[in-house]
Image (tube, rainbow, N blue to C red):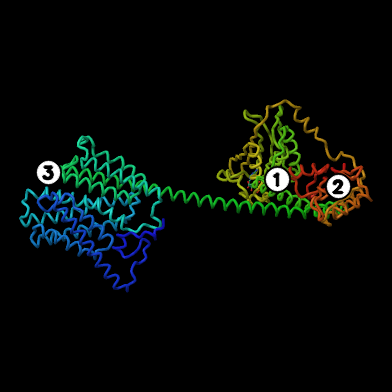
Amino acid sequence: MKASGRPLFMFAILTGQDAKGAPLYTMSPNIRSHSLFILQVLVVFAAYFATARWGLSHNAVNDFASLIWPPTGIALAAVFLFGYRITPAILFGAFLVNYLSGAPILAAAAIAVGNVLEASVGAWLLHSFRFHPMLNRLVDSFSMIIVALAASVISATIGTATLGSTQLLSASEVPITWLAWWAGDALGALLITPFLLRWLARPPGNGYRTRAQLVESILFLTILIALTLLIFWDPIPQLRGITPAYMLFVPLTWGALRVGPRIMTLAIVTTATLAIIGSFTGTGPYVAADMNDLFFLQMFLSTLAFIFLLFVSAVEERKEATKRLEANVLSLKEDVFNISEADRAKNDFIATLSHELRNPLAPILSTLEIMRIRSAKDAELTTMVDTTHENVMRMTRLLDDLLDIARISRKKITLQMSSVSLNSILVHASEMAQPIMNKFGHRLTVNLPIVDTQLHADQLRIEQVVVNILNNAAKYTPEGGQVSLSAAATSSGVEIRVRDNGIGIPRAEIENIFDPFKQINEGKNGVETSGLGIGLSLAKRLVELHGGTISAASQGAGLGSEFIVRLPAQNPVILLPAQKIAKDSPPHQEQRKQKRKVLVVDDNEAAANSIATLLNHSGHEARVALSGAEALEKLATFSPDIVFLDIGLPDGSGYDVARTIRNYCDPSPILVALTGYGHADDKQRSVEAGFDHHLVKPVSIADLEKTLA
Ligand code: ADP
């Protein structure tokens, strides 16, 4: 329901605005504000006067102190809403009522001043407590209760003092009259002010209810009214005395939980009015035969108002907090979505960038291989070529790591899991790390367990992890250091340890070094610090993909480091002694060289030519084709033993060319896929297309020789 369709009637009369705050009249601002003010004064005066007459006509203690005094509530709400300029309406209303009740003119004026002071101080207190008429915070109801109890002291004190000093009250009557006056005013404020403020204050935005809420509110009010009548009006004589007043707590609790402060203030006022009327007409549990009965009624109604005002505000506060929380969760979800989208875009970018940067390295490496062969007699040139080669290889490794990180983040990595021997992993890894150990003059000791363990793992990936850690040990240990690699079976799997006596890691940083791009030893201690800070992060993710953990330990800076990789294992099995395994791995150099006819197919002319030159230099006969069609043509005339076939060709994919060769060439040559992608899925596709081997660019002469052999 739209708020604009239902201007609050009372609100409109009193403020000249509809529920959205738009003016209802089109008059000049001056006339409008004057006539509006006069209207407000008249309404407040009339309401004050009428309810005050009603209050005094019912069981007033010594004619002036009523046990229920609604005007206090009206006056307090009016000053709070319209400001202190409304006080003349209260002053005049109170004066007239008291004068008509028999008070001398001065006494009536003094009592009226008391009433005005009470409302003004009360409104001032409410404003200073930052009271909000919506009553949707516990603090609002609490402030309301405090103000009702405190402000009433003023009127009761001035009123009884005036009556006492003018002999209208005897000294003995003063205390009881004061008490009745104070309690009547407090109850009036407690019941009427929250009701008026909550109904007259503009509901913020869409303060309106849904149809279901409206039906529930009506049902609640109906049941409450029926029960109040049953208790206070004795409609069924047989039930008289069996229907205790505290039964009202049941529907009121329902209301406090469900219908909100607006309906609850109405419910409390309605219940109180019906209870008071019943008691005055001689029915219900607090029949007002004498003043004591009315004190009990007062206490009952005050307790009711007290409890349920606080209760409904607390419930409302909780509802609003939940709403805010839900909104926050929603916006957090949006943020997370945006962040993960941005992260995905970043990973895609890193993947593409690394791939694109990696491709040109292929011809560079090939060229370097040629230069190395040609510069064999020039020692200085050989050193320069070696340095360049080493740096290009380092770049290749970094790009590979970046690609892997991006793949893991995009969940595009699949592990080639199989049953693998722990010892063979360690032997391979130590072999791969040996060159860097030699470069830094480190001594690498490898202690393999006598009893080997079978792991269910991706052998290449775990080797990659161990090599990464060994490379770090070499990098972060000053020259001539000690690095050890060892492993042992544990109750849950295996532990691989790499220990060095290098620069160590400050304790505070140990947890951080596994974060991507985190580097802590930059430029310290004269050790090699090149890198992107992704090696350990990659190692961690790979180990975790295997269901394992990785941790680091160090006694501190300068005291060396230890990295421990824990992996789950299959049952340990006894294999050959470790040393035997190491010896068994066949040295590549021993493979015999044979002259081959090779066709290199690559649309990157520089890359194709450099590989062909490299092969020709090594004594093979190599030719180049720059497209799939040219490759098929050359195949017919050249009859190669081996075809190195790039996957991304201008006239189709290398996979299609491979399939055609497999279908139409007999005997068909050995097919080697040459691509920038070394992922397991890519290798699988190559196998499916009919390739015999899969080489990832950049390809070194050693890779080529190995394949040719
Ligand atoms: P980087 O490319 O910088 O080597 P890593 O992720 O492999 O990146 O390592 C992160 C950081 O952890 C390194 O920058 C280094 O500060 C620290 N670190 C790694 N291994 C060792 C080690 N064995 N000794 C001391 N510090 C190390």
Q: Residue at x 26, y 67 (%)?
A: 37
At label 1, which amino acid type do we have? Glu
Q: SS at mark 3?
A: loop
Q: The C terminus appears in which quarter of the rendering?
A: top right
Residue 479 located left or right of residue 37: right
Residue 432 image offset from top left, x and y in percent: 75, 41
Which of discs 3 and 2 lies nearer the camera? The answer is: 3
Mark 2 and mark 1 in contact? Answer it, CB < 8 Å: no
Does mark 3's beta carbon lie closer than 8 Å to ligand 1?
no
Which of discs 2 and 1 lies nearer the camera? The answer is: 2
Tell me the distance, in whole angstroms, between the alpha carbons under discs 3 and 1. 105 Å
Task: Name the residue tied to disc 3.
Answer: 290
Task: Name the residue tied to disc 1.
Answer: 479
**Would you call the spot at circle 1 few (<14 residues within 10 Å), some (14-19), or many (20 or more)?**
some
Mark 3 and mark 1 in contact? Answer it, CB < 8 Å: no
User: Which comes sooner in the sequence, label 3 or label 2?
Assistant: 3
User: Which comes sooner in the sequence, label 2 or label 1?
Assistant: 1
Residue 597 located left or right of residue 133: right
At label 2, which amino acid type do we have? Thr
- Toward which corner of the image does residue 550 lie, by quadrant? top right
Residue 374 located left or right of residue 318: right
Q: Can residue 300 be seen in this view?
A: yes
User: Which comes sooner in the sequence, label 3 or label 1?
Assistant: 3
Q: SS at mark 1?
A: loop
At label 3, which amino acid type do we have? Asp
- Toward which corner of the image does residue 627 lie, by quadrant? bottom right
Tell me the distance, in whole angstroms, between the alpha carbons under discs 3 and 2. 113 Å
Task: Name the residue tied to disc 2.
Answer: 660
